[in-house]
Amino acid sequence: MASSEPPRLGRKRPLPPCPNPLFVRWLSELRDQAAERGLKTQYVYQKALRSLKKYPLPLKNGREAKILQNFGDGICKFLDDRLQKYYREHGEEGKRRFADLMIIVRREGFQGSLLTVYFRLFRKQQQRDRRKQIGGRKGRQYVPQKRSGGYAVLLTLYRHCQVPGNKGFMFKTELQREAQHLCDTSFTVPNMGSKYTAWSSVSTLIQKDLLLKTHSPARYSLTELGLALAERLEASESTGNEELKTGRTWVEGKEDARVMVDLTEEESEEENRYVMERNATLEPGTSILGKVQAAGSEVQVAAGSLLPGCYDVILCVDFIETTGGNTARKQELVKELQRNGVPFDIRKLNVGDFLWVAREKVTPVPGQLRPPPARELVLDYIIERKRIDDLCGSITDGRFREQKFRLKRCGLRHPIYLVEECGSAGAHLSLPESTLQQAIVNTQVVDGFFVKRVQDVKESAAYLTVMTRYLQKLYQNKTLVCRSKEDLEGQGGNERVCAVKERENPSCSLLSFAEFNQGAVKNKCQTVREVFARQLMQISGVSGDKATAILEHYGTVSSLIEAYQQCPSDTDREKLLSCVRYGKLKRNLGPALSRTIYQLYWTQGPLS
């Protein structure tokens, strides 16, 4: 009798060996022990174990595992303690073999079976023993030249690791910014007649197993070898020695040109384009600490910052506001701004219709056709302009909620909705006036936006003029410091507290325009968390605040399903999200919305 199940055809793909077998085994033992005792920490260990198995690179110690999801200080310390115990039990020979295994696994890209990897390790050990018998010469150790790119990167990462509470890695932009004052050449702009920068030496550090690069955008951290070399460089820096006394050492010098030739294979074209946009705030040759003489004292200002009087506040207008549709009406806005003497620039904005940037004042360089590019930092104010008829259409097709969600996530703290009446055209809308008024009130009360209502284009231009002059006065005595979006999100804090600090502090942190506009691209690759948020917002009754509150407890669909699995009954599953608090008033989601989400993600039948 033939089997009802169809046969599986095709060749089975061999699974790659686990690059961290010891860590997986120890973490599995810790999870099993917690399960035997009935502790809820077993679920934490299970999540960490799942994250470790997905990680494709070998880890040298528990500290490197901190970059993984669900790994905290406790689990990392446990792995470090077990690794030290393993070294004590097996001696130096076991430690060296463990390091050799990690190098072979990384070099071979995990191709072949685990038996093949151990066989290559055995062959390598035989070759080492044969060289000892023959008496071959010792390999030369790589040490970067003082004040070179590799030297600056190693020292910067080492000093970052010494700071209490550090995150264990650095992004490319902040690493270039912090390392620039330790290097004689620029990390972003090549020297005359060359296409290489100081950042090119990072490829050599990775090849020499001194630097570890993970994630996208890239995160950089030191390996054990890199940490040891950076300690010696730091000691040499503190004592003022020009060279390290390491015996037979290869130092970058005369062979620097040959070394630089091999440093072009690391970054892809797409990553280079992304990085150049993020690093557009750094001026060629700028050091991380510029010394400014002020009132007879020496003041240190971070690179990428703009001093008072060294920049102009410019209004940026989205090109959609000046072209297409009713061109005559849109050109009227431009003419009004010109008549009011407002400095403005027309460009493509990926979110919002108007915003302001602080543009650096640059002077032309003698002998060059064009002046050097000016740095631009985005001020914390952005305007979305809506005519009543456009507002009606955006509510109908769903753009209204999406635009508000993107404005909240753009990184600017003061979003403004400019609502413009459309005269007699408002009498022929597809939605009643009460619905539009309710949408405007919700935007101000629920979403926390500032709403400004005007009658026509002239009043819109007048409001933009008044805002431009207000911001020019607000920022005239402030030092503007460039920060990445990750740093600004890490600062957090209440908006009212931030506003008080902004008035009291003569300096403020802002995004560069290149990073802001790149981060606001509508069709960029989305994370699982962002896709989950968009799914939730398609449910009737789920606003942006409610979706954010759910994501704080369950970041992905998988974590929500796991929580449903742990509930003992369907009643508990229906009420799982009912007590999740959202918004400024911290209200509960309620049982009705919780039941709807439960039916969507757990039950197989239609929603009731």
Image (cartoon, rainbow, N blue to C red):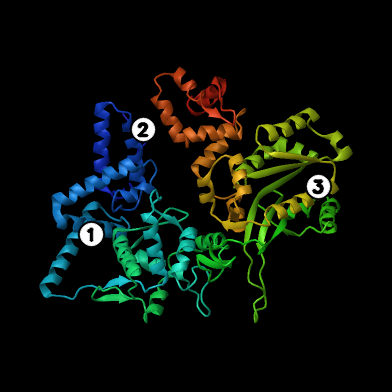
- Upstream in the sequence, badge 3 or badge 1? 1
Q: Is residue 37 left or right of residue 586?
A: left
Is disc 2 placed on a helix, strand or loop?
A: loop
Mark 3–mark 1 distance (CA, rounded to whole Å):
68 Å
Q: How crowded is mark 1: few (under 14 residues within 10 Å), some or many (20 or more)?
A: some
**Among the 4 quarters of the image, the one containing residue 586:** top right
Which residue corresponds to mark 2? 5
Labels 2, 3: front one: 3
- In the depicted structure, whether residue 47 falls above or below residue 157: above
The amino acid beneath tag 2 is: Glu
Q: Position of residue 244 (x, y in %)?
A: 29, 73
**Among the 4 quarters of the image, the one containing residue 146:** bottom left
- Upstream in the sequence, badge 2 or badge 1? 2
The residue drawn where x is 83% and y is 56% is 340
- In the depicted structure, whether residue 107 falls above or below residue 365: above
Labels 2, 1: front one: 1
Out of 546 and 13, give the one closest to the viewer.
546
Which residue corresponds to mark 3? 460
**Among the 4 quarters of the image, the one containing residue 567:** top left
The amino acid beneath tag 3 is: Ser
Is disc 3 placed on a helix, strand or loop?
A: helix
Q: Residue 100 carries which label?
A: 1
Mark 2–mark 3 distance (CA, rounded to whole Å):
68 Å
Q: In this view, does 406 lie to the left or right of 47?
A: right
Mark 2–mark 1 distance (CA, rounded to whole Å):
46 Å
Out of 232 and 296, give the one closest to the viewer.
296
On the rendered image, what quadrant is the N terminus found in?
A: top left
Q: How crowded is mark 3: few (under 14 residues within 10 Å), some or many (20 or more)?
A: many
